[in-house]
Image: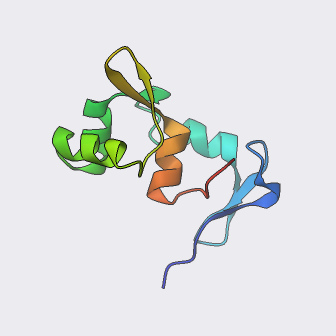
Amino acid sequence: MMKKSKVINNNISDEIVLCTGHTLPILELYKIFLSEYPDVLFVPHLSEILGVSKKTVLKILNDGELQFFKVGREYRVAKLYLFEYMGIIPKIT
């Protein structure tokens, strides 16, 4: 069974405990994981990262499974929201 990641003190500046048991500052994780992608992701980015179609990404967004914001008619997702969705970090409120 895979261990879940957790944030110490639930603050973006704190460390995350990875499933391996190692700790890593969340900001460091943010810099290295998916570093080839911009900080704000578009539907094509999400499709590529998640390995699903653009239509499936839109369903995930519209079903409320992944937080997003809209600019005009375009969906945008902060990389941090994607980390939460993927279970890399717990939901930060």
Residue 24, horizontal then vertical, whole percent: 69, 54
Residue 40, horizontal then vertical, whole percent: 46, 27
Residue 33 visible, this angle: no
Residue lying at 45% horizontally and 56% vertically, measured from the top left = 86
Residue 9 visible, this angle: yes
Q: Is residue 91 above or below residue 38?
A: below
Closer to us: 20 or 90: 90
Residue 9 is left or right of residue 22, and the answer is right
Residue 21 is left or right of residue 85, and the answer is right
Residue lying at 50% horizontally and 79% vertically, measured from the top left = 2
Residue lying at 44% horizontally and 40% vertically, measured from the top left = 34
Residue projecting furthest to the top: 72
Residue 5 is left or right of residue 65, and the answer is right
Residue projecting furthest to the front: 63
Residue 69, horizontal then vertical, whole percent: 47, 28
Total numbered labels: 0
Q: Is residue 54 above or below residue 93?
A: above
Residue 8 is left or right of residue 86, and the answer is right
Residue 28, horizontal then vertical, whole percent: 65, 42
Residue projecting furthest to the right: 9
Res 89 → quadrant: bottom right
Tell me how the rendering is colored: rainbow
Closer to us: 68 or 38: 68
